[in-house]
Amino acid sequence: MRILISTIGTAAHFYPVVPFAWALRCAGHDVRVACEPGFTATVGATGLPAVAVGHDVDLRTFWQGVALEPAAGTGDDDHLRTRMERSMAMFTGIADAAAGDLIDLARAWRPDAVVFEARGYAGLIAAHSVGVPAIRHTWGIDTNYSRRDFDRPYLDELCARHGLTGVDPLGDLTLTPCPPSLTEPDEVNRARLRYVPYNGSGGLPSWLIPAPERPRVCVTWGHMFSQITDNLHPINQAIEGLRGLPVEVVAAVAPGQRALLPATPPPQVRVAESVPLNLLLPTCAAVINGGGAGTLMTALSAGVPMVVVPSHTDEPEYAERMSAAGAATWLSYREADAGAFRAAAEKVLAAPSYQEGAARLAAENAALPSPAALAAGLDEVIAQARRGG
């Protein structure tokens, strides 16, 4: 079969789909990944074939004038609504830039289904335009379900420009790589699969081979935070807070983020550039992070407890669900200074309940069907999507 995959141009959205895309290829299916031109190299580095559609969109333009926390005199609810509005303006703007080309590609190539990452709405539009199933692939916890009524007017306006009406933002079928206990009961046409982390290509550093002499704490803030803010202030605060604790600290960053950290970090801190988190996190006693889906789900699959500091988009909901499951503690962005980071890290490292909660989620994830199992039964997956459409 031919499967067209649609993603926006950021690793945080695309990487969770890579294991299923490769499972499809290994099962003998023809896969193509449609993305904006500036993202084709990232897709190509995964070994998947990339097709450029539309034009590049600068995500930062959608966030100008919007802070990570409410301004003085502004309530949390108003600030959240503003951020949700900007998010949908961004996602529909990205989709609008790609939809025309993606529809043309789908008409020419005739895929049997379109798999779109949860905000890759150009793929949803292309699927409906050519009459094939639209299969939504979430990044882990499905927060889009609870926001579908808020999102729908933005998507309706976008779809109308392409002659479509009544398009469900959730597609015809949702693939959910997430333990059931972290997903609220709902009526979504859903197929579950195991979260298999893909965090980019990279070798195993020699220092990761022996067991650490002290508890290892990873500090990482994913891909999107620095794209929007041009800083890694939370990592710098966490490094300062962990100073002097009997732990080894690893600041995990992408190459373009290294300049945002101190030129000379404290002696107990190692800066790891481009080390895939799925190689690093199984050696860690805890991970401090911003609550991005990729980091959270990779930590979940490795059974590593977390300190989460959400700042935008779906991160607060992720943090709350991980905390409720007993696998994390979380801080609000406004209170996350060095002292707060230190206290939270000490709490997670000292209490066995966090490790137990993380281990439960890892076991629940491991019990789900693998991406390979779903790809082997692709006929039934597409049939289920058609029944739900």
Image: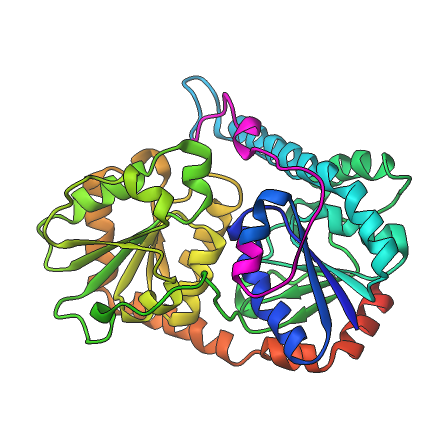
Question: Picture quarter containing residue 207?
Answer: bottom left
Q: Nearer the viewer, residue 187 or 302?
A: 302
Image point (88%, 50%), residue name: 129
Q: Nearer the viewer, residue 233 or 5?
A: 5
Image point (63%, 44%), residue name: 37
Q: Quadrant of the N terminus?
A: bottom right
Q: Is residue 67 magenta?
A: yes
Image point (51%, 23%), residue name: 64
Above or below — where is 24 with respect to 327? below
Above or below — where is 278 with respect to 290? below
Q: Is residue 140 magenta?
A: no
Q: Position of residue 27 (x, y in %)?
A: 68, 80
Image point (19%, 76%), residue name: 210
* Residue 375 relative to residue 180: left or right: right
Q: Position of residue 322 (x, y in %)?
A: 43, 58
Q: Is residue 30 visible?
A: yes
Above or below — where is 194 with respect to 163? below
- Count of numbered marks: 0
Q: Position of residue 136 (x, y in %)?
A: 70, 58
* Residue 185 relative to residue 169: left or right: left
Q: Which residues are magenta?
A: 42-68
Its colouring scheme is rainbow
Q: Is residue 141 visible?
A: no
